[in-house]
Amino acid sequence: MTILFKNIKELIQVRTEQISFVSGKKMQELPTIKNAYLLIKNGLISDFGAMDECPNLKVDEIIDATGKMILPSWCDSHTHIVYAGNREGEFVDRINGMSYEEIANRGGGILNSAKKLQETSEDNLYEQSKVRLEEVIMLGTGAVEIKSGYGLAVDAELKMLRVIKRLKENYPIEIKATFLGAHAVPKEYKKNKQRYLDILVDEIMPKIASENLAEYVDVFCETGYFSVSDTDFILKAGKKHGLIPKIHVNQFTAIGGVQIGVKHNALSVDHLEEMRDEDIATLQNTKTMPVALPSCSYFLSIPYTPARKMIDAGLPLALATDYNPGSTPSGNMNFVVSTACIKMKMTPEEAINAATINGAYAMGLEKKTGSITVGKQANLILTKNINSYGFLPYSFGSNQLEKVYLKGKEVNFNREL
Ligand code: NIG
Ligand code: FE
């Protein structure tokens, strides 16, 4: 099956060489080809270039993209898409003045979602989660990481991970799974947190390894949740079971989570709303990708990750949604890219790099997706008629996507699946 896109107004994020990620000043470079063609063969990008060099080939389908742009699908490297129910009651409590912390302290927050999930069957959880997955695919996401962490008990954590596995099997989108058993301490272990950590390590991790249920391990390293030494304990154990760290750090307080992440060669450290100079220094010249989650800052009214300071210090940065029922009930990467520009003063070039190639790296998928490169999956966004790619973040809240393609096929859940 071959498809040829012709007359593309601008083909965005074209990389002739395989790159892992971009950092510092290089984040400002977003290579494009104006008036371009793009050839897809059997789900992969096979060729691209300027229209006046377009080969005269026999293809199965020709798509005329006059006035429209094509960019690689968004890569959302941090989500909690699998969850049960919602928490709009707590949303109203926050409007009325309670803080996220106060809600958590009275047994709400993550524990509230865990209770709901424990009472939900695996089939029902799958049905609820697939609606969100289909939603984000239609919003242009072409690769996604999904975490456990609303089970907080052996069976419920495994239930979440099995739902993620089922989503992987049934949808064309690339999915990576992360074990986040250390998301909150269940009430019954408040006085004996170590017992809970032992359960995660001794009872759940071996099952994850034997059933191949996750690639990554995560910890909510935060005051009132898990300390730096708890994080060290979980990451060490994860390594024995082949789980690579991707961790929640510096959301509300900076307690050394960045340092422990880098020590364990974490693939990414995520949130980073509270960054000390020493945290920026620790990340320099490492392979650990910092990940910002601006929709979470927006929804909770907490500081934004200091992207300018970090990029100006030479760091890379990825952008992700954090889609979850408590701090970010939204999986819209278009909004994330806009908000990064509007609130974090990232340029459109930096934000698009952060949401494509750098996001792919933060999921270990940089060889498969995240740029227009020969051999990569044809995960594509075809825009509506727009004047420039800067219009995407500029027109925040408006939908500028006309069609989305995964592995070379147009996806539309209103009509198929
Ligand atoms: O990434 N910070 C920890 N975990 C989630 C929020 C969890 C929740 O409130 O349900 C996050 O923001
Ligand atoms: Fe999160």
Image (tube, grey):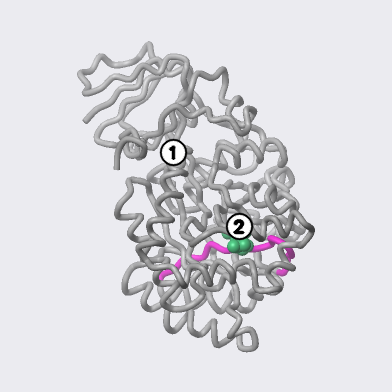
Q: Nearer the viewer, mark 1 or mark 2?
A: 1
Q: Among all residues in the image, which is located at the extreme right? A: 97
The residue that disc 2 covers is 270
Near mark 2 (Cα within 10 A), the count class, few <14, some 14-19 or many ≥20, is many
Q: CA distance from mark 1 to mark 2?
A: 25 Å
Tell me the SS state at disc 1. Answer: helix
* Depicted 269 relative to depicted 356: above or below: below
Report the residue at 53% width, 76% height from top: 234
Quadrant of the image for the N terminus? top left
Report the residue at 48% width, 29% height from top: 401
Span highlighted in magenta in the image: 242-255
Location of residue 334 in the rendering, given as x and y in whole percent from the top left corner: 56, 37
- Please name the amino acid that badge 2 sits on: Asp
Asked whether 152 or 198 is in front, the reply is 152
* Depicted 224 relative to depicted 266: above or below: below
Query: Would you say 375 lies left or right of 156 here?
Result: left
- Please name the amino acid that badge 1 sits on: Met
Tell me the SS state at disc 2. Answer: strand
Asked whether 331 or 124 is in front, the reply is 124
> Is disc 2's CB within 8 Å of ligand 2?
yes
Marks 1 and 2, the one that precedes in the sequence: 1
**Residue 248 shows in this picture:** no
Residue 251 falls inside the magenta stretch: yes
Residue 165 falls inside the magenta stretch: no
**Residue 343 shows in this picture:** yes
The residue that disc 1 covers is 138
Location of residue 370 in the rendering, given as x and y in whole percent from the top left corner: 45, 41
